[in-house]
């Protein structure tokens, strides 16, 4: 049975010399961050098929987030595996997760607030251009 109690204690997260990860944990973390990078490549290919500029911008931002989080996560997994003192601390993963959540909030805000506003501006500009043609 897994004991999750250590996850809720500060020494677990802020130990600068954590116990080396088991092979299962290492492979799971590495696979997760590699999956983020592969997903980003898929999003970029999907972006090429989109016609609407707003959606292309949103997909570009999503792909950038996935690649950045994936590469930084792989770097921290490498440091954790190699037991580099400062960079193998587990709190880096917490900071990375917090950064990813903030980035996701900004993407959702862009999708819910900015995209409708930009679409309205594009429709208004197209309507105005229709009457402004010489």
Image (cartoon, rainbow, N blue to C red):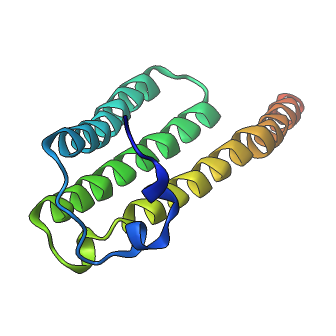
Percent from the top left, x then y, of residue 45?
36, 26
Classify 81 as above or below 64: below
Classify 77 as above or below 32: below
Percent from the top left, x then y, of residue 48?
41, 26
Percent from the top left, x then y, of residue 85?
19, 78
Name which residue lies at 24% across and 53% down. Answer: 74
Q: Image quarter for residue 54?
A: top right
- Check the image and name the residue furthest to the front: 1
Return the residue nearer the eye: 65 or 56: 65
Name which residue lies at 45% across and 28% down. Answer: 47
Q: Tell me: 131 left or right of 72.
A: right
Query: Where, quadrant-wise, is the N terminus in this rendering?
Result: top left
Name which residue lies at 37% across and 54% down. Answer: 68
Task: Please tell me how many numbered marks the rendered image carries.
Answer: 0
- Check the image and name the residue furthest to the left: 82
Q: Tell me: 77 left or right of 2.
A: left
Name which residue lies at 55% across and 23% down. Answer: 51
Q: Tell me: 86 left or right of 122.
A: left
Q: Image quarter for residue 117?
A: top right
Percent from the top left, x then y, of residue 7?
46, 56
Query: Where, quadrant-wise, is the C terminus in this rendering?
Result: top right
Return the residue nearer the eye: 5 or 127: 5
Return the residue nearer the eye: 4 or 102: 4
């Amino acid at each position: 049975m897994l004991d999750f109690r250590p996850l809720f204690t500060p020494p677990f997260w802020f130990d600068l010399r954590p116990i080396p990860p088991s092979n299962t944990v290492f492979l799971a973390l590495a696979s997760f961050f590699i999956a983020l990078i592969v997903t980003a490549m898929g999003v970029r290919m999907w972006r090429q098929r989109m016609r609407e500029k707003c959606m292309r911008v949103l997909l570009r931002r999503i792909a950038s987030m996935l690649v950045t989080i994936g590469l930084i996560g792989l770097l921290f997994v490498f440091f954790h595996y190699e037991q580099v003192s400062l960079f193998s601390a587990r709190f880096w993963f917490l900071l990375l997760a917090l950064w990813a959540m903030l980035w996701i909030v900004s993407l959702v805000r862009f999708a819910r607030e900015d995209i409708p506003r930009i679409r309205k501006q594009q429709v208004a500009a197209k309507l105005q251009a229709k009457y402004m043609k010489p």
